[in-house]
């Protein structure tokens, strides 16, 4: 039995009421909640050893540096990266993608091609469009199919020796689809293209082995994996990180500076200009420890039970359509005939149930289905079947009021 009641006690926020009702938090794909160990780590940092890192000889600075670098090692082990300096701290997924896109603006030429998938988050579309404008490279799209998966035959057709980069999310945030990234990486490598995988939505559910995947870049955000906002990770293979120019100039990323010439520091500092989110990085490590103690295998099995249960319950409702029915994580994106998703979201909130409504930063997917948006219920390992029952009752109430 998955110890969900014990786990729920680790999350103070799950005890609160919203609009007089017990909170049912089903917006985990937007951000996860924070366990007390992570909150304690943040309080401990500011209460006991807040200091700037890598610079001071004094004790607090040493302690902060040690904890921060230890977090980097935890992240390295979690993602099975070969070298600890292949782990770059970022402000989050969006920041990591922009770092790579900006670096590639110096490596691409007019007529080169880059490929993105139709299932992307805006943060994985817009930076590449900006990159294409700057370099004259051409953006190609792997189309999607009705069931919410990628059309891999079309991928074979658009892939060529002109392809320099391929970008795809590991799991779609709008639909939950788990993409065949191993196959994408293998095929891209055959034509000599690099691959960046956006792991923001996969990492709460799947522990990826980056060496085994042989991926060139992988990005994620701590706040979707029980950590704080404003911190994340960019993994890059050593040879790629050596090749890319630094993203920002500033302190911490230099070796020597004169007004004539600056030489850059080695990895990972070359990409970490300025004072980072020290506390956030440390708390990120604590969050990964917490989730690993529960175990990603167990989390995946339990969340799938929630997904199957929720899907079955929703399918019993007349006029309800679920988008994306494939191999997926615990995300259910749906609409009810004749009702705007926003209206459903507002009434659910009045009843204490938090879901996301709208286009989920993935307008191309909504355009594909010709809908303005969806209601998205996304589950985490601390949710329960009882909460799904509360949600279904609230949804039925909303449908009655709105139809
Ligand atoms: C949340 C998310 C992002 C953006 O993450 P930030 O933490 O906002 O930078 C990017 N891609 C996917 C798939 C996401 O789910």
Image: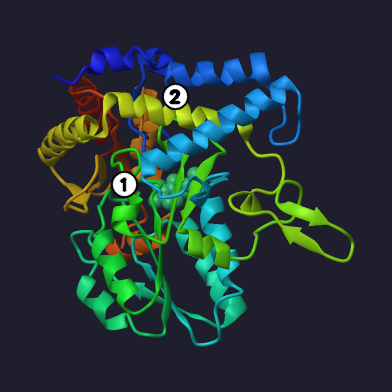
Q: Which residue is mark 1?
A: 208
| Residue 360 visible in the shown view | no
Quarter of the rendering occupied by the N terminus:
top left
Sequence-first tag of 1 and 2: 2
Pointer 1: residues within 10 angstroms few (<14), some, or many (20+)?
A: some
What mark, if any, has residue 34 been given in the picture?
Answer: 2
Whether residue 281 sits left or right of residue 383 in the image: it is: right
- Would you say 46 lies left or right of 213 here? right
Residue 249 x/y as whole percent = 74, 56
Residue in view at x 20 percent, y 63 percent = 146
Residue drawn at x 50%, y 87% is: 111
Name the secondary structure under disc 1.
loop
Name which quarter of the figure residue 168 lies in: bottom left
Q: CA distance from mark 1 to mark 2?
A: 21 Å
Q: Can residue 143 be spotted in the picture?
A: yes
Is residue 63 left or right of 156 when viewed as pictured?
A: right
| Residue 385 versus residue 44 in the image, above or below | below
Above or below: residue 168 compared with residue 155: above
Q: Residue furthest bottom?
A: 111
Residue located 56% across and 52% down the image? 95
**Which mark, by number, is residue 31?**
none
The location of residue 59, given as percent across then percent down, is 71, 20
In terms of depth relative to the viewer, which is nearer, 3 or 129?
3
Q: Nearer the viewer, mark 1 or mark 2?
A: 1
Q: Tell which of 118 and 107 is nearer to you.
A: 107
- Give residue 283's position: percent from left, percent from top: 51, 27
Q: Is residue 158 above or below residue 258?
A: below
């Amino acid at each position: 039995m998955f110890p969900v009641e014990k786990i729920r006690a680790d999350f103070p926020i799950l005890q609160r009421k919203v609009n007089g009702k017990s909170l049912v938090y089903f917006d985990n794909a937007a951000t996860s909640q924070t366990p007390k160990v992570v909150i304690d780590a943040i309080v401990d940092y500011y209460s006991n050893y807040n200091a700037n890192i890598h610079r001071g000889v004094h004790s607090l600075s040493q302690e902060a540096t040690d904890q921060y670098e230890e977090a980097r090692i935890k992240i390295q082990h979690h993602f099975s990266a070969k070298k600890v300096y292949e782990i770059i701290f970022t402000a989050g997924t969006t920041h990591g993608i922009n770092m790579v896109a900006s670096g590639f603006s110096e490596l691409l030429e007019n007529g080169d091609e880059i490929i993105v998938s139709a299932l992307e988050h805006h943060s994985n579309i817009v930076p590449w469009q900006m990159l294409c404008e700057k370099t004259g490279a051409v953006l190609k799209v792997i189309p999607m199919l009705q069931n919410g998966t990628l059309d891999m035959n079309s991928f074979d057709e658009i892939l060529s020796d002109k392809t320099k980069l391929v970008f795809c999310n590991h799991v779609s945030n709008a639909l939950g689809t788990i993409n065949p990234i191993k196959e994408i990486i293998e095929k891209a490598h055959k034509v000599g293209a690099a691959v960046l995988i956006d792991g923001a939505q996969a990492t709460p559910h799947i522990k990826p082995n980056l060496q085994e995947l042989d991926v060139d870049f992988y990005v994620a955000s701590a706040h979707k994996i029980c950590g704080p906002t404003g911190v994340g990770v960019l993994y890059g293979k050593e040879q790629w990180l050596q090749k890319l120019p630094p993203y920002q100039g500033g302190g911490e990323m230099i070796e020597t500076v004169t007004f004539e010439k600056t030489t850059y520091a080695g990895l990972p500092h070359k990409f970490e200009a300025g004072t980072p989110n020290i506390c956030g990085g440390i708390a990120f490590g604590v969050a990964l420890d917490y989730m690993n103690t529960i175990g990603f295998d167990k989390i995946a099995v339990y969340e799938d039970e929630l997904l199957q249960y929720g899907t079955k319950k929703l399918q019993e409702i007349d006029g309800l359509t679920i988008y994306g029915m494939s191999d997926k994580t615990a995300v259910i994106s749906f609409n009810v005939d004749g009702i705007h998703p926003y209206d459903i979201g507002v009434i659910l909130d009045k009843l204490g149930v938090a879901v996301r409504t709208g286009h989920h930063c993935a307008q191309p997917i909504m355009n594909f289905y010709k809908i303005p948006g969806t209601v998205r219920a996304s589950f985490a390992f601390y949710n329960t079947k009882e909460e799904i029952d509360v949600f279904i009752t609230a949804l039925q109430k909303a449908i009655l009021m709105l139809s």
